[in-house]
Image (cartoon, rainbow, N blue to C red):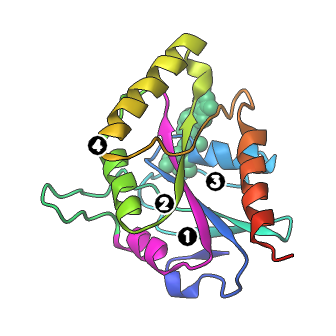
Amino acid sequence: MSNSDVAKCPKNLIPEYAFIGRSNVGKSSLINMLTSRKSLAKTSGRPGKTQLINHFLINKNWYLVDLPGYGYARVSKSAKKTFQKFITQYFSLREQLVSAFVLVDIRHNPQPIDLEFMQWLGENGIPFSIIFTKADKLRPKAIENHVEAYKTIMLETWEEMPNYFITSSSKDIGKDDVLKYIDDLNSNMTID
Ligand code: GTP
Ligand code: MG
């Protein structure tokens, strides 16, 4: 189901997990890896133009939610951060959301927009994990260094490093870890 309006998203209480990140971070590729489909998530010819919230029902059990990138959002220099309005609406209104996954390209230094977005999630009490993408582009030592650099920056504002995953969609790395994490959260929610 694709929606341009948060109010029209599924009304049922199936747990959902939202995937978000800057354009070109590898979000569509990651979604296709997680679902073992070649083109479930389509890439837009005009990045930043897609303003849709896409709900994919997985195993009749949980929703994978594909959100537009925030790379094109203007982040004001003032304290008030202005991510695309409906991204903030989505995160503020969806009670079904269990956790967000913020995708960051492992090759880049921590980017202000990603850090500010995670800050915003934190301020709004929305749980999230970080998914480092494109790990195949770096050697193991460089991966380690980049993650350490990320931790250092995060620990300037966070008490602890959020949960994170190292993935590569082209080399099928990290798929089982992410899926197991989601499965564990889902099974912890059932009342027994
Ligand atoms: P938009 O939809 O345009 O915002 O981009 P996206 O975040 O969905 O990224 P997409 O999955 O379309 O990937 C962007 C580019 O990165 C493509 O050329 C992909 O082939 C490449 N890419 C994605 N994931 C990986 C990866 O794990 N490894 C490598 N080497 N390249 C990747
Ligand atoms: Mg995409």
Identify the mark at residue 112; answer none if there is no mark.
4
**Secondary structure beneath label 2:** loop
Residue 160, how many percent across, how many down? 44, 43
Disc 4 to disc 2, C-alpha distance? 18 Å
Residue positioned 41% across, 32% down in the render: 150
Residue positioned 79% across, 57% down in the render: 183
The amino acid type, in three-letter code, at marker 1 is: Ile
**Secondary structure beneath label 3:** loop
Q: Is the residue marked 3 within 8 Å of ligand 2, measured from its CB?
A: yes
Earlier in the chain: of badge 2 and badge 1, it is 1
Earlier in the chain: of badge 2 and badge 3, it is 3
Say if mark 2 contacts mark 1, CB within 8 Å.
Answer: yes
Disc 3 to disc 1, C-alpha distance? 13 Å
Identify the mark at residue 53; answer none if there is no mark.
1
- The residue that disc 2 covers is 68
**Secondary structure beneath label 4:** helix
Q: Which residues are magenta?
A: 85-106
Viewport quadrant of the N terminus? bottom right
- The residue that disc 3 covers is 42
Earlier in the chain: of badge 3 and badge 1, it is 3
Classify mark 3: residues with Cα within 10 Å, few (<14), some (14-19) or many (20+).
few
Query: Horizontally, is 121 left or right of 15 in the view?
Result: left
Does residue 57 appear in the picture of this structure? no
